[in-house]
Amino acid sequence: MKRLLLPLLVALLSPFEVYGYDGPLFDAMAQLNHKSENERPGFEKSISRVRDAGIYKIALFARSKKLGENEKALLNLHRDNKDLIVLGAPKYFLHENDIGKSFTKRTLKNIDKYKYSFVGEILFTHADKCNTSSRGGIGRQHESGETYLDPSGKGVADFLVKVSSKNIPVMTHWEFYDWERDWPKFSKLFLDFPNQKFIIPHMGFGSPKQAKLILSTHDNVYMTISEKDKDKGSISDPIKQSKFGSGFLNDEKQLKDEWKEILIEYQDKLLFATDAHKKHRWKKYSKIVRIYRDILNQLPEEVSKKIAYLNAQKIYDIKNKRIKKRFKY
């Protein structure tokens, strides 16, 4: 009887089961998509999933289709989870080819008011997605096949001039499917604001060669490794689809040599993240974390620690407090 009860007791007392890398994790990017007060219990459940997965910090921002939308919901969630959530200024979907004055004014004001640690995703380039029922249906479609915000716009420059004084990073959503058009513009942007830190989510869904060029050229640019475990799919425009880089893993779920080299060489500039946002990502949060624990386990220990949490602590200026052990090593 004792032999039967002991494993059960261990399972009940352990907050979660560890796979692969078993150290701390700082989720450097996730999003709150809140439409009504009735959805709040669902987000509280999502935060419970984050804790159950062994995440000790999560960088979270609201998704807004109008200025201020979802901001209150995020602030309320943070109020009850201050030990876990690192707040970011909301992401705004409806920029019209440039950043407007109203967005700049409101964001700067609320960075001070709510002590935001970063600016949530600014969608510079984003390829339209195909209709996939598992992801909640078809997204916004454009004749050009993309959302596009010109990085050389006057409004962008005005915003960065002002936000750079706040000393917080800006999430810069740039997908590398139109490299010839975009690389010169973004490279100039990064050079024009050398004291501003930029975070490119998903490594831009690019190739090892593209990631290496950006990270070696610009000291102020960082990247999350979210959604890079496999090849990027579900893009409406087949030409754009063909320009995306490969995922990290081969058919045996092992890191490809070319990606392993990048992760090791640029270990100080890469951040673990899940990019949980819509329901389909939040529902499989634990699965995403397990995949990345396995990826991190394929790297040298010191590299894994930096990507898993140390780099995020630095870039979000989280004081190096002792991390409470919540799981077995």
Image (spheres, grey):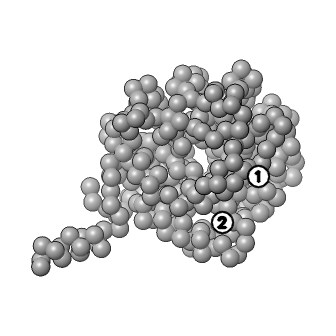
Is disc 2 in contact with disc 1, using a CB cutoff of under 8 Å?
A: no
Three-letter amino acid code of the residue under disc 2: Leu
Give the mark nearest the N terminus, 2 or 1.
2
Residue 57 vs 128, above or below: the answer is: below
Between residues 283 and 202, which one lies in front from this camera angle?
283
From the image, which quarter does the N terminus lie in? bottom left
- How would you rate the neighbour count of disc 2 (Cα within 10 Å): few for under 14, some for 14-19, many for 20 or more? many
Three-letter amino acid code of the residue under disc 1: Tyr
Q: Which mark is residue 15?
A: none
- Number of marks in picture: 2
Helix, strand or loop at label 2? It is: helix
Identify which residue is drawn at 64% across, 54% down: 133
**Mark 2 → mark 1, Cα distance in angstroms:** 14 Å
Q: Quadrant of residue 160?
A: top right
Between residues 34 and 80, which one lies in front from this camera angle?
34
What is the x, y in percent for residue 70? 72, 64
Q: Which mark is residue 74?
A: 2
- How would you rate the neighbour count of disc 1 (Cα within 10 Å): few for under 14, some for 14-19, many for 20 or more? many
What is the x, y in percent for residue 163? 73, 45
Identify which residue is drawn at 59% across, 34% down: 205
Between residues 127 and 236, which one lies in front from this camera angle?
236
Q: Which mark is residue 92?
A: 1
Helix, strand or loop at label 1? It is: strand
From the image, which quarter does the C terminus lie in? bottom left
What is the x, y in percent for residue 89? 69, 55
Q: Is residue 298 visible?
A: yes
Tell whether 154 sits left or right of 83: right
Residue 288 vs 46, above or below: the answer is: above
